[in-house]
Image: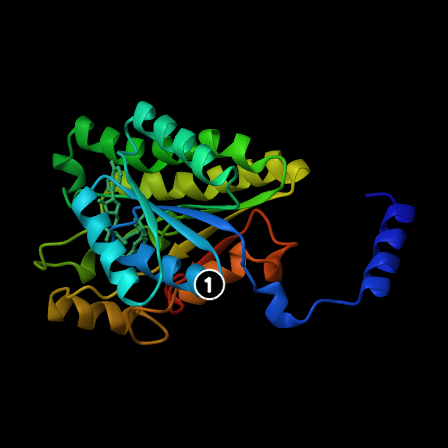
Amino acid sequence: MQTETLIRREKDIEERAIPHLRDLYDLTGKVALITGGAGQLAHQFAEGLSEAGAEIILTDIKGDGLAERKREFKQKGVDVSYYPAALTDPKAIYDMFRSIRENYGHLDILINNGGMTYFTPLEEMTHEQFSEVIEVHLKGSFMMVKNALPLMKKRGGVIINIGSIYGMVGADQSIYADSGINSSVAYAAAKGGMINFTRYLASYLGEYNIRVNCISPGGFYAGQDDEFVRRYCNKTPLGRMGDSYDLKAVGVFLASDAAKYITGVNLPVDGGWTAR
Ligand SMILES: NC(=O)c1ccc[n+]([C@@H]2O[C@H](COP(=O)([O-])OP(=O)(O)OC[C@H]3O[C@@H](n4cnc5c(N)ncnc54)[C@H](O)[C@@H]3O)[C@@H](O)[C@H]2O)c1
């Protein structure tokens, strides 16, 4: 932006007065679509965005899980919409966006959160398993973005990709032992990809005022094996796993005007795991 334009912009802001902090976080009238909507972390994003005023649309491969989420939100007085669709099915994604266009006319916020993994060790992982993990996370998110753009380009928008600490650092095998869970090479490749996918999109879409950022969560508690939890907590500077609202406000922050000059970043929400 040229100097005169910058000065004019600053003058305009002075004349209009700087918005109050609560208005910067306000998402009233915004439409948000969240993939992996039946899962654990989507619930936090949906809860935060809806409390900030956004209309929520959830999508997931699990139709029953989506219906259950809708019931849960209804009990809290929030009406969420949902579309069952597989992230590996281009036609289902296309149809979902056609329906969103008909029902809402535009989309303001997209959270690419849906994902899956295999616990298979490197030596035993099949190429089909590897491909599926890459396909769901990367190709699925690519198709979501491609279909979302026509609904976002005119008004600007926000895309939040969900990465992982394991897109930033290698998995520490010692914490898994015989817990029955692990983190796979395919997951590392997919989540590393999500972080640079974010940077590419942020560079490309800035001119449309579409901001694109990544959140990289650490491990969230979901009833894992006690020994695993103990080892995980010992390795984490804040001494615990993620809880049921550690992400709630983070999604709102990145989706709102509070973060209106932030694009292309990867924000770890990991209790310090990747700082050590
Ligand atoms: N929970 C954690 O500790 C943690 C940590 C780091 C990153 N993450 C990431 O956060 C995101 C959400 O994780 P979560 O813990 O809520 O997982 P989750 O398994 O509870 O939810 C993921 C959802 O994605 C859906 N999904 C999987 N494959 C799909 C497909 N092909 N098409 C459509 N939907 C599909 C699942 O049905 C599920 O409901 C994921 O991308 C995950 O990798 C989670």
Left or right: residue 78 compared with residue 178: right
Q: Please report the residue visible at 27 percent of the width from the left and 35 percent of the height from the top.
A: 85
The percent coordinates of residue 111 (x first, y second) are 42, 47
Q: Secondary structure at mark 1?
A: helix
| Image quarter of the N terminus | top right
Residue 222, quarter of picture: bottom left
| Image quarter of the C terminus | bottom left
Residue type, mark 1 in image: Val
The percent coordinates of residue 142 (x first, y second) are 42, 32
In the foreground, 190 or 62: 62
Q: Residue tagged by mark 1?
A: 250
Q: Please report the residue visible at 45 percent of the width from the left and 66 percent of the height from the top.
A: 249
* Mark 1 neighbour density, 10 Å: few (under 14) some (14–19) many (20 or more): some
Report the residue that reaches farthest toward the bottom. 239
Residue 99, quarter of picture: top left
In the foreground, 84 or 261: 84
The percent coordinates of residue 72 (x first, y second) are 24, 61
Left or right: residue 44 compared with residue 198: left
- 270 relative to 82, above or below: below
